[in-house]
Image (cartoon, rainbow, N blue to C red):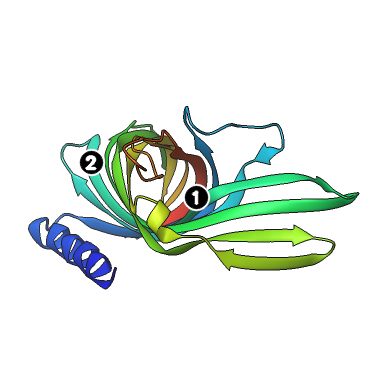
């Protein structure tokens, strides 16, 4: 895992070195995730799991309205289920943490004002960090335990679509955005020759500054 983090950092340094016009920024916010897929039985009690997402990005101009935007984030994913057990409220949460690396194509819409809307899309690859965990909250108490990492594919590949507003200031740009992530590959490992269709999905609300 240390090699994965080191490789991600090296890639970002390379991107910065090849473009003198590259801008760098930092972004963070809330993440809301679930699982989806043919082999994941969604029930009414399952809800979006709140989490976090923060990291850095580069903007590499291609044209006056188009940019390539490689990013790297530390993000939490998983799902949450609420219910009753013996008359007491119970919450079961499954947590996973990833280093996520999207590479986005961003289209900026010019306006006569200091803010401009934009849309973006592109692929991402995620690398699971550490062991997934189960957290059970019941009767006013909470207990956490590790899940078996060997049951999961540690690489998550998917796509991103979203929209943003960029507000230009004197030396920085403030960005507020919403994005949707959808996994393309199953996060559950094949077992005894049987494949499983269980994927990450989620949306994020973030804000950031670029220079």
In the image, 110 versus 161, the foreground residue is 161
Q: At 36% across and 35% down in the image, what residue appears?
A: 194
Q: Residue at x 22, y 69 (%)?
A: 3
Q: Residue at x 37, y 39 (%)?
A: 186
Residue that mark 2 sits on: 67
**Circle 1 sits on which residue?**
206
Q: Decide: is 71 above or below 47.
A: below
In the picture, which quadrant includes the N terminus?
Answer: bottom left
Q: Is residue 39 visible?
A: yes
* Residue 92 drawn at (x, y percent): 68, 52
- Farthest residue, direction right: 87
The disc at residue 61 is none
Query: At 58% from the left edge and 46% from the top edge, which residue is drawn?
Result: 79
Residue 48's spot in the image, x, y percent?
62, 42
Q: State the CA–CA distance, disc 1 to disc 2.
A: 19 Å
Label pair 1/2, CB-CB below 8 angstroms:
no
Furthest residue toward top: 38
Instruction: Compare marks 1 and 2 and give the one earlier in the sequence.
Output: 2
């Amino acid at each position: 895992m240390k090699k994965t983090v080191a490789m991600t950092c090296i890639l970002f340094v390379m991107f910065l070195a090849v473009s003198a016009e590259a801008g760098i920024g930092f972004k963070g916010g809330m993440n809301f995730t679930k699982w989806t897929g043919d082999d994941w039985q969604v029930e009414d009690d399952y809800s979006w799991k709140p989490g976090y997402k923060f990291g850095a990005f580069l903007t590499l101009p291609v044209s006056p309205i188009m940019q390539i935007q490689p990013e790297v984030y530390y993000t939490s994913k998983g799902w949450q289920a609420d219910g009753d057990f013996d008359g007491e409220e119970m919450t079961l949460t499954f947590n996973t943490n990833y280093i996520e690396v999207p590479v986005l194509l961003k289209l900026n819409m010019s306006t006569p004002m200091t803010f401009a809307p934009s849309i973006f899309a592109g692929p991402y690859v995620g690398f699971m960090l550490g062991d997934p965990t189960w957290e059970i909250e019941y009767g006013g108490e909470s207990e956490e335990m590790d899940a078996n990492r060997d049951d999961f594919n540690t690489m998550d590949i998917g796509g991103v679509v979203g929209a943003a507003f960029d507000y230009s200031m004197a030396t920085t740009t403030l960005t507020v955005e919403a994005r949707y992530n959808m996994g393309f590959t199953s996060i559950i490992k094949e077992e005894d020759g049987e494949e499983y269709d269980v994927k990450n999905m989620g949306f994020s609300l973030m804000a950031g500054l670029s220079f």
